[in-house]
Image (cartoon, coloured by chain):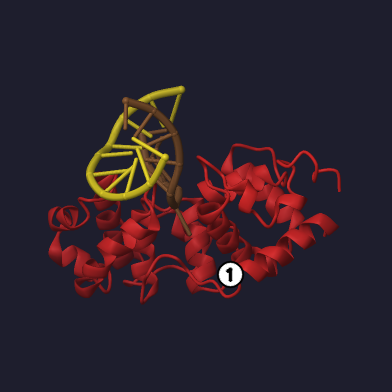
Chain colours: A red, B yellow, C brown
Amino acid sequence: MDKRIKEILHLLAGEYPHIGPALNHKNPFQLLVAVILSAQTTDQQVNKVTEKLFTRIKGPADILEMGSSWLEKQIRTLGLFRRKSQHIYETSLQLMEKHGGCVPHTRGELQNLPGIGRKSAGVILSTVFGVPALAVDTHVARVSRRLGLTDGSNPYVVEEDLCRLLPPDLWTMIHRRFIAHGRKICRARKPLCDECFLLPHCPQNFFGSGK
DNA sequence: ATCCCGAGGG
DNA sequence: CCCTCTGGAT
């Protein structure tokens, strides 16, 4: 692994030591629901909704029992709420019919569910099944690009580049730490470069990019 | 490439 | 007003 990358990872580990999943949940199904809800939405907004939602919803059968219009009302404060409601309902249906009410353990099966793409499958695999995955969202992509770890705008390309550069046993933590850094310092709009502990190692800094 | 789509911040 | 938020399906 590159020396500069090692130093970056070391500094990130120091700043964001033991960092857990940002989406609150008590079982794999609840995480699956939360991940669907998280599209183009802050985790804070998702957690606000799921705090109430998950007192009634423990598994896919609960969704089918309550119905999609009920669900839609519960998540109305989130963006894309109609589509998310449909996806959660359809996914619950498929889980009951094809997977015995359980969340599947493989990427292929997960991505086959409506509303679950590569990023969401990666989050589920790494968070509840302990499978190494580097889920690339808007934060991970942006931070990776600014640090010069990739030049791709396509998330799949970014994931390929990162997975080539970084060992699998670090993928899950790197995902979380990049997100934490992307929220706090390396923000999309006005990045706080003057407060950033990675600045000496960042190509964005003209004077520090040389070595 | 386009659509979905509310909350929050600037 | 504007942009962004742990995207995915068509």
Chain identifier of the residue bearing label 1 in the image:
A
At mark 1, the secondary structure is loop
Give the quadrant of residue A16: bottom right
For residue A208, side relative to residue A104 (left or right): right
Question: Could you tell me residue A88's position as x and y percent?
Answer: 29, 56
Look at 36% across and 59% down and name the residue there: A44
Q: Residue at x 65, y 48 (%)?
A: A144
Q: Nearer the viewer, residue A114 or A145?
A: A145
Which residue is the site of mark 1?
A131
- Residue A26 lies in quadrant: bottom left
Left or right of residue A179, residue A206 in this image = right
Seen at 74% across and 64% down, the residue is A167
Q: Is residue A70 depicted above or below A156 in this figure?
A: below
Residue A50 seen in render = yes
Residue A155 x %, y %: 57, 44
Residue A203, image quadrant? top right
- Provide residue A119's location: percent of width, then percent of height: 50, 53
Q: Callout 1: few (<14), some (14-19), or many (20+) C-alpha neighbours within 10 Å?
A: some
Q: Amino acid at mark 1?
A: Val
